[in-house]
Image (spheres, rainbow, N blue to C red):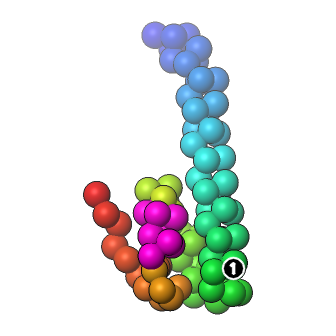
């Protein structure tokens, strides 16, 4: 049993690494879009970006096209 679980560790680590990379890449791209649209990212907004999960980041990435202000963008609750 233990040997079977150990065999699955590398695949699990690989998947976790891919998910983490996707989240970091999404966060980085969203930050670039925010700077282009609204200017420098204030500390409070950077903190929100840093703490957001992938689902929230994707929600903000979708909403950036319509949000008129940074405050309006990052104050939106996640849409499901």
Q: Position of residue 57 (x, y in %)?
A: 51, 63
Residue 60 located within the stretch drawn in magenta: yes
Q: Is residue 74 above or below residue 56?
A: below
Q: For the point 63% across and 76% down, which residue is it?
A: 34
Q: Position of residue 51 (x, y in %)?
A: 53, 69
Q: Is residue 38 above or below residue 30?
A: below
Residue position marked by numbered label 1 in the rendering: 35
> Which quadrant would the C terminus be assigned to in this image?
bottom left
Q: For the point 41% across and 82% down, which residue is it?
A: 75
Q: Position of residue 76 (x, y in %)?
A: 37, 77
Q: For the point 53% across and 77% down, which residue is it?
A: 48
Tally the marks: 1
Residue 36 located within the stretch drawn in magenta: no
Residue furthest front in the image: 66
Magenta residues (range): 59-66
Q: Quadrant of residue 39?
A: bottom right
Q: Main secondary structure of the magenta part?
A: helix
The local crowd at label 1, few if under 14, some if 14 to 19, many if 20 or more residues have their Cα within 10 Å, is: few
């Amino acid at each position: 049993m233990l040997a079977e679980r150990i065999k699955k560790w590398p695949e699990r680590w690989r998947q976790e690494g891919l998910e983490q990379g996707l989240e970091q890449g999404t966060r980085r791209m969203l930050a670039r879009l925010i700077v282009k649209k609204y200017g420098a990212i204030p500390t409070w907004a950077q903190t929100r970006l840093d703490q957001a999960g992938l689902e929230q980041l994707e929600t903000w990435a979708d909403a950036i096209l319509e949000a008129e202000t940074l405050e309006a963008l990052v104050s939106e609750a996640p849409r499901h």
